[in-house]
Amino acid sequence: MNELIAGVVAGLRHGRPMRLADEVQALRALPAANVAGQLAAMPAERAVTLLDQPEFANAPEVLGLLPVDKAALLVTEMAADRAADVLATMGNGAAAIIDALPLDVRVSLTALIAWPIDSAGGMMTTEFVTVPAGATIRETLAHIRSVERSRETVYSVFVLDAVGRLAATVSLRRLIAAEPDSLFVETVAEQSPITIAPETDREAVAELIRRHDLLALPVVDADGFPLGIVTVDDVLDALVAAHTEDAQKFGGVEALDRPYLETGFAAMIRKRAGWLSVLFLSEMLTASAMQHFETELERAVVLTLFIPLIMSSGGNSGSQATSLIIRALAVGQLRLRDWWRVALRELPTGLTLGTILGLVGAGRIALWQLAGFYDYGVHWALIALTVSLGLIGIVTFGSLAGSMLPFALQRLRFDPASASAPFVATLVDVTGLVIYFSIALLVLSGTLL
Amino acid sequence: MNELIAGVVAGLRHGRPMRLADEVQALRALPAANVAGQLAAMPAERAVTLLDQPEFANAPEVLGLLPVDKAALLVTEMAADRAADVLATMGNGAAAIIDALPLDVRVSLTALIAWPIDSAGGMMTTEFVTVPAGATIRETLAHIRSVERSRETVYSVFVLDAVGRLAATVSLRRLIAAEPDSLFVETVAEQSPITIAPETDREAVAELIRRHDLLALPVVDADGFPLGIVTVDDVLDALVAAHTEDAQKFGGVEALDRPYLETGFAAMIRKRAGWLSVLFLSEMLTASAMQHFETELERAVVLTLFIPLIMSSGGNSGSQATSLIIRALAVGQLRLRDWWRVALRELPTGLTLGTILGLVGAGRIALWQLAGFYDYGVHWALIALTVSLGLIGIVTFGSLAGSMLPFALQRLRFDPASASAPFVATLVDVTGLVIYFSIALLVLSGTLL
């Protein structure tokens, strides 16, 4: 019976999760104390299987509520990468548990915790399979069989040289396909495998695994010694997390740490009020710009009618350009040095888009005037011209500014994804008002102004 | 020598890509005719390896330039899922090549082409490994060894029942770990594997693979017969493509079909002018709203000074709420029926954020007035009150509208990601003006208005 449970649990850990994810989702909705009680009561293997799921978002909290020796026992059995993530987010409570761990686990976990959570070091696990150079294929397969239970992946095996540096990697697929199995493992191994440094950003790791269709990627130190392995399932989780963070940043929200409905009211306000206030303070410059043109505004109130229209068109075209460039930079279609090629494309694109909107805008004013829907005064044609030229200028500026901002941020070593839509819109709003009123002064000087 | 090349090429196809992705990137920069010439001249295995890369974006064009019999030869050898994708995007040129294919390849490719490219059917390959129920583990491993060369993945094997329906799946890992190998394969297989229907959306496929840490997912028809297999590397590609499409949609651009720098000028204008014009036409309602309040505007020009500030705050808060909800819906943290829970959270959140901005705004007006930077007139305190109340109303409305829009779109079976930042901003702009002027009429009636 016990063997049966162990078998089921091993099955759960190794790719046959009997709707485990659904159980975790159910657990997450319960109070942490309740979940801690359940974990303490169930067999350790089962508790470990549950804790190993990255979706178990309140695992750090739950672990902190367990007796220290029980928590240490569970952490010892957990996948090293997941255990490190959980301990890293536990805060002060982690120290007592770490002190209670067996020495070898303590050493490997503290090494893992040291890396930022969004780096290759933070994503990797230390539970990889190694064989010495000179092993045969048969010996390698026998070794895999003997350690399989305790390894996160056995689909990629590291071949080490005499001093323990990574010499080659070999996939389980190549090992299985190779015949005869008395050959040295090197004969089927990849001799210059793609490796990464532990400080590599998670999106770069994901892109490398995706581009080269890998199941796992070795992490090595500067001297070529293997530190860990990043597996494709960690990369999938990282991609989804990065996608969420990017989407939130682009919407002008600081990335949430927890799912929407699980984020508390105070945390939600904190994550949103900061950016919103910064944008609000910057946008106050529009009031200053308007005050500057106070005389013109009083003389020609008709000009104010089109301010929202013109401002939003600038913001929209900027938002388009920014979203295109952020993604192209993120997936490596564009590099920093391509900025001038982008500028040379956005200039004619902005002019064309601005002209299209300018013609529609002038048509709208002419139609309303001639059909008698509204009276823009005797100088309505000049007003239409002002609005058209304003749109051309602002849409061109919006496209240029929106496309250059991600490059500028990347150059300054910020995340280009921080060039959020609201940020670009605010930048374009202030400049847009100045462009609009300057054109009005040129066109309407001597008539309305 | 030929064996060596075959070995290298096989290595390239099976997870040891000697920086193949970089070669593809270089090829993509050359004119299609040039690339076609190179492909025709190189050994077929090498050409197939290159064509199999999803990054080879101009493969359809290149294939169309080759003699039909040569093209058919290459397509026959390509991975079935990739071949189907390439033929599906070739347009008219594909028919001649399909006619020249061997019957079995033609049947399996036309079946694959029939599925939308962003469905499980469009992502799957038909090159999976099957064994009959009752096979031993040893027989299964021997079978894997014999077909390994022609299969996209051997890490997941399908066990079929007597009539050929999918009865179970087993991972290569479980097969290797199992002892003795004279046992039936069922003893280590997953008896009720997670399967998907071919019409499943690619993001749902990705979420399932990610949640359950799978390397491959069987696609079965309504009767349980296996149609194909979706592998984790296809899912990675699909996730990145979906991320790009979402980011572009959120920025108010129709998703581009090609990388930014490879998209032609005309295509770029088409992708951006449509949305921009729709938003522009909707935003014209702001001009109508302003015209409606013409008398008030003429009497109190001072009110116009804060229009950009108030409009943009509404747009920003709407953009925040929308980006949070779109992602939460996309990753399954929220369901359609949760809309009222979100509304109940966004109402107090919007009120709080609006109050924060309102206080800052009133403070700004008081400071400018009292410090003598600008004179808002004798009723400056009432103007500050109008701006504050306006901000509270508009930020609350923006948060509510921005959070409810993705639900409404999902309910109407549109992609919630279409609730782009510019779309929300436009919606909030028009309403925001009406809210602002209505509050102004209430507060300033009898004094300024």
Image: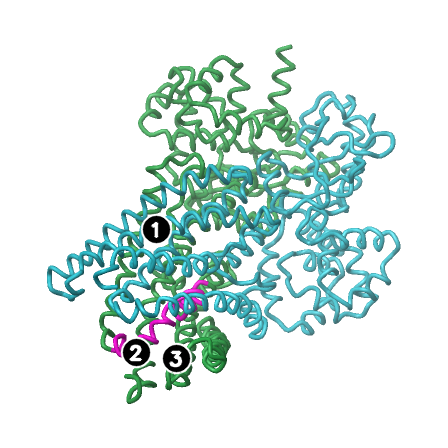
Chain colours: A cyan, B green
> In 3D space, how far apart are the residues under numbered discs 2 and 3 (Cα atoms)?
10 Å
Q: Nearer the viewer, residue B31 or A372?
A: A372
In the rendered image, is residue B196 in sight?
Answer: no
Q: Amino acid at mark 1?
A: Gly
Write the residue at 56% across / 33% down. Answer: B130
Residue B376 shows which numbered tag? 3
Which chain letter goes with mark 2?
Answer: B
Q: Is residue A440 above or below residue B171?
A: below
How packed mark 2 is, by other alpha carbons closer than 10 Å (few <14, some 14-19, many 20 or more), is some
Q: Which residue is mark 1?
A: A393
Q: Is residue B340 above or below residue B270?
A: below
Tag 3 and tag 1 share a subunit: no
Tag 2 and tag 3 share a subunit: yes
Tell me which numbered mark, 2 or 3, is placed earlier along the sequence.
2
Q: Amino acid at mark 3?
A: Tyr
How packed mark 3 is, by other alpha carbons closer than 10 Å (few <14, some 14-19, many 20 or more), is some
Judge from the rendering whether residue A352 lies leftward or rightward of residue A41; answer left or right: left
- Which residue of the protein is positioned furthest toward the left in this rendering? A371
Write the residue at 57% across / 43% down. Answer: B168
Which picture quadrant has residue B117? Answer: top left
Secondary structure beneath disc 3? loop
Secondary structure beneath disc 2? loop
Residue B300 shows which numbered tag? 2
Secondary structure beneath disc 1? helix
Magenta highlight on residue B318: yes
| Region rendered in magenta | B296-319
- Which residue of the protein is positioned furthest toward the top in this rendering? B1
Write the residue at 33% across / 21% down. Answer: B96
- Which residue of the protein is positioned furthest toward the front in this rendering? A446
Q: Amino acid at mark 2?
A: Ala
The quadrant the C terminus of chain A occupies is bottom left
Judge from the rendering whether residue A358 lies leftward or rightward of residue B145; answer left or right: left
